[in-house]
């Protein structure tokens, strides 16, 4: 029973981390991203472009933000030293002043 409670806590923490990422991206909060993202974090865009952590944070620091970023159907898988969260990400962003 302790193991399942522990897994539930890990899953809840992983989902909260994803929601915190979403809030930081919508607010344009570079400091929050700096605190929460691991040094080797990468952000993979829907077109396949991979953005390193420091590039993402710098762009947010310079004014980038998402108008909307909502996750749906998040599934959490845990392993001894890793937690993986998968799901759909619904976003609205302005790209070069176009929605």
Image (cartoon, grey):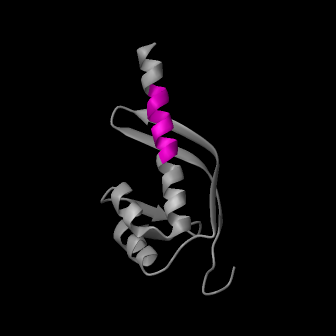
The verdict on residue 10 being magenta is: yes
- Give the percent coordinates (x, y) of residue 56: 42, 71
- Give the percent coordinates (x, y) of residue 17: 46, 48
- Give the percent coordinates (x, y) of residue 13: 46, 39
**Left or right: residue 30 compared with residue 22:** left
Residue at 52% over, 65% down: 25
Q: Residue furthest top?
A: 1
Relative to 54, does residue 2 appear above or below in the rendering?
A: above
* Segment colored magenta: 7-16
Kindly indicate the quadrant of the structure image that contains residue 97: bottom right
The verdict on residue 22 being magenta is: no
Relative to 87, does residue 42 appear above or below in the rendering?
A: below
* 91 or 44: nearer the viewer: 91
Residue at 45% over, 27% down: 7
Q: Main secondary structure of the magenta part?
A: helix
Q: Residue furthest bottom?
A: 97
* 79 or 90: nearer the viewer: 90
Relative to 66, does residue 38 appear above or below in the rendering?
A: above
- Give the percent coordinates (x, y) of residue 33: 40, 62
* 48 or 75: nearer the viewer: 75
* Quadrant of image for the C terminus: bottom right
Kindly indicate the quadrant of the structure image that contains residue 61: bottom left
**Left or right: residue 62 compared with residue 91:** left
Residue at 46% over, 21% down: 5
Q: How many marks?
A: 0
Q: Residue furthest left?
A: 39
């Amino acid at each position: 029973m302790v193991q399942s409670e522990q897994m539930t806590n890990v899953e809840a923490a992983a989902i909260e981390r994803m929601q915190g990422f979403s809030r930081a991206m919508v607010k344009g909060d570079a400091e929050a991203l700096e605190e929460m993202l691991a040094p080797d974090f990468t952000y993979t865009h829907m077109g396949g472009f991979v953005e390193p952590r420091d590039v993402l944070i710098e762009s947010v620091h310079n004014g980038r933000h998402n108008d909307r970023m909502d996750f749906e159907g998040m599934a959490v898988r845990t392993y001894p030293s890793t937690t993986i969260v998968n799901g759909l990400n619904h976003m609205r962003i302005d790209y070069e002043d176009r929605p």
